[in-house]
Image (cartoon, helix red, strand yellow):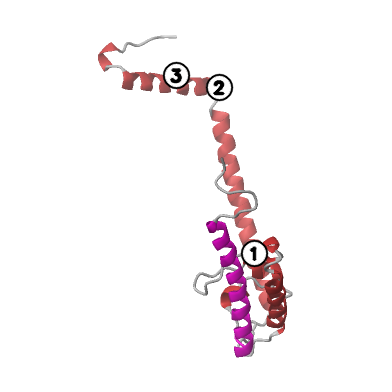
Amino acid sequence: MSRYSKGETSAAKLQEKQAKTQSLITKILLIRKAIEDRQRLPSLDALKSKRGIPFKSALNWSDADLGVTSCSYNTSREPYNTEYSDQLAAALETYNNLTPATQTLPPQKRITQRSQQEEISTLKNQVDYLTNTLGEVYRAYMQLVARVDEHTRQDLRYQQVLKSHTLALDRAHLTLVKP
């Protein structure tokens, strides 16, 4: 007999459901507070793409310090979470349109034709060095392959078998066996 009747949900599942709903509410409150203070949330900004922070990334956003956990899209669209999901989408859109006043772009290093030519020559030297090194490794490999023929490989296996027998048996019982 099952523990729960049809349609009944365990207390653990209900708590998990409430925790995800509470996390959605916390996300909304944190984003709204960041908008009011005109500040950015570093853990949320880490999810930023070219066009801002996508809705699904905001749902997957988790930060233990802020008390935010991840949530799937389907969970956010459940009837009991639809309102919070819509509020999160609206707050996120405002947050994406927020221009950071404190954040300035770092000055970019000027690229001149001379610096480009120097970089190109450095890269060409590195390519030449790597090509030469690869050639040396290939030559060494081919030399080893040429020197080690099938008979040598069989002899090495024979020596390995003898060594393993030496370890297994006493040295007194070993005698030289000619093939």
Q: Amino acid at mark 2?
A: Glu
Residue at the spot of label 2: 150
On screen, residue 17 above or below 111: above
Q: Position of residue 98 (x, y in %)?
A: 69, 85
On screen, residue 25 above or below 75: below
Quarter occupied by residue 119? bottom right
Q: Position of residue 77 (x, y in %)?
A: 71, 65
Q: Earlier in the sequence, mark 3 or mark 1?
A: 1
Q: Position of residue 91 (x, y in %)?
A: 69, 80
**Does the magenta-highlighted stretch encompass residue 56?**
no
Most frequent secondary structure within the magenta stretch: helix
Q: Quadrant of the C terminus?
A: top left
Q: Amino acid at mark 1?
A: Leu
Q: Earlier in the sequence, mark 2 or mark 1?
A: 1
Q: Which residues are magenta?
A: 11-39
Q: Marks 1 and 2: in contact by CB < 8 Å? A: no
Query: Which residue is painted at 68% across and 66% down in the image?
Result: 76
Camera-nearest label, 2 or 3: 3
Label 3 packing within 10 angstroms: few (<14), some (14-19), many (20+): few
